[in-house]
Image (cartoon, grey):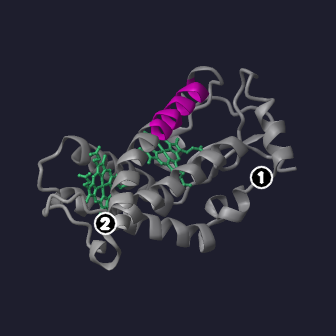
């Protein structure tokens, strides 16, 4: 049985196929790169391959953020402090946001995740842990001091990535449990319940 759609809300295609494939491929590649980095074999060839896949996905997402469909274009989810605070004040309400895309707080988390991943893959390319095996492909282009800094940052930022991803999943659980809004199904099917009033 289909559920009744509330007044002022409609069911719309919000996430295009490119964004959805990007998201789930990114989940697989980041989890794999992270897991292989921490727990994988000493020879990190597979880690590098998943890292390159993350680079390709990030290039796609940056282009999509510039020329892709409206809900995923960066300019459409950059919100000022006023709108962000106004939205933050509604978080305590136990009702769905019906936001037609990334809400102002979700948008911050999207930008944070994309930024840390860009930093992670960039430092990975220049990392050289002095084990003579797992040398980043661009490590020779910079000084050994830079190699060391890149390696240290790459290791440290992996913890920040873990925390951001945990926060991301916790936020999605919060929407489901507390606000009664399922955000995951739209990221699979593309269809989302959104408010009609876009003011
Ligand atoms: C390594 C793990 C993950 C990463 C790096 C990640 C990253 C991202 C990014 C970058 C976006 C923005 C999508 C875009 O506009 O391009 C996003 C959105 C989203 N992610 Fe994840 N994600 C991860 C895991 C998950 C998991 C496990 C779930 C499901 C429980 C999930 C559910 C969602 C949903 C529902 C959205 C849309 C949020 C909204 O409605 O604004 N993500 N994620
Ligand atoms: C999102 C993508 C990536 C994630 C999540 C990631 C994560 C990690 C993690 C968790 C480690 C182990 C850190 C530790 O010892 O505690 C690691 C090590 C390493 N990664 Fe990545 N990485 C990514 C992409 C890349 C890329 C693109 C490259 C280069 C092509 C790269 C090169 C390296 C190297 C050389 C090491 C060894 C550093 C060491 O032993 O201290 N990584 N990475």
Q: Position of residue 15 (x, y in %)?
A: 56, 55
Which residue occupies the foreground of this view, 184 or 13?
A: 184
Q: Position of residue 178 (x, y in %)?
A: 63, 20
Residue at 66% across, 50% down? 101
- Residue labelled 2 has its Cβ within 8 Å of some atom of ligand 2: yes
Q: Where 193 sits versus 144, above or below?
A: above
Q: Earlier in the sequence, mark 1 or mark 2?
A: 2
Q: Is residue 16 left or right of residue 123?
A: right
- The magenta span reads 163-176
Which residue occupies the foreground of this view, 147 or 109?
A: 147
Mark 1 Cα-neighbour bin, 10 Å: few <14, some 14–19, many ≥20: some
Taking the magenta stretch, the answer to whether it contains residue 174 is yes
Q: CA distance from mark 1 to mark 2?
A: 31 Å
**Is label 1 in contact with label 2 (beta carbons under 8 Å)?**
no
Q: Where 89 sits versus 124, above or below?
A: above
- The residue identified by callout 1 is 79
Magenta: main secondary structure: helix
Q: Where 168 sits versus 197, above or below?
A: above
Which element type, helix, strand or loop, lies under badge 1?
loop
Which element type, helix, strand or loop, lies under badge 2?
helix
Q: Is residue 11 visible?
A: no
């Amino acid at each position: 049985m289909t559920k009744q759609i509330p007044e002022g809300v409609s069911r719309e295609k919000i996430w295009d196929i490119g964004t959805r494939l990007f998201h789930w491929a990114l989940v697989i590649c980041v989890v794999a790169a992270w897991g292989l980095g921490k727990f994988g074999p000493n020879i990190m060839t597979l880690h590098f391959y998943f890292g390159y896949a993350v680079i390709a996905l990030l290039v796609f997402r940056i282009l999509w953020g510039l020329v892709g469909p409206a809900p995923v274009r960066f300019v459409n989810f950059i919100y000022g402090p006023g709108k962000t605070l106004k939205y933050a004040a509604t978080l305590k309400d136990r009702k769905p946001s019906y936001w037609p895309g990334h809400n102002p707080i979700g948008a911050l988390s999207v930008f944070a995740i994309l930024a840390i991943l860009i930093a992670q893959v960039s430092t990975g390319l220049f990392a050289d842990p002095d084990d003579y095996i797992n040398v980043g492909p661009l490590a020779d282009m910079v000084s050994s001091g830079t190699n060391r800094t890149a390696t240290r940052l790459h290791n440290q930022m992996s913890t920040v990535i873990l925390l951001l991803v945990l926060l991301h999943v916790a936020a999605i659980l919060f929407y489901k449990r507390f606000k009664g809004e399922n955000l995951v199904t739209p990221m699979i099917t593309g269809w989302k319940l959104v408010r009609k009033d876009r003011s």
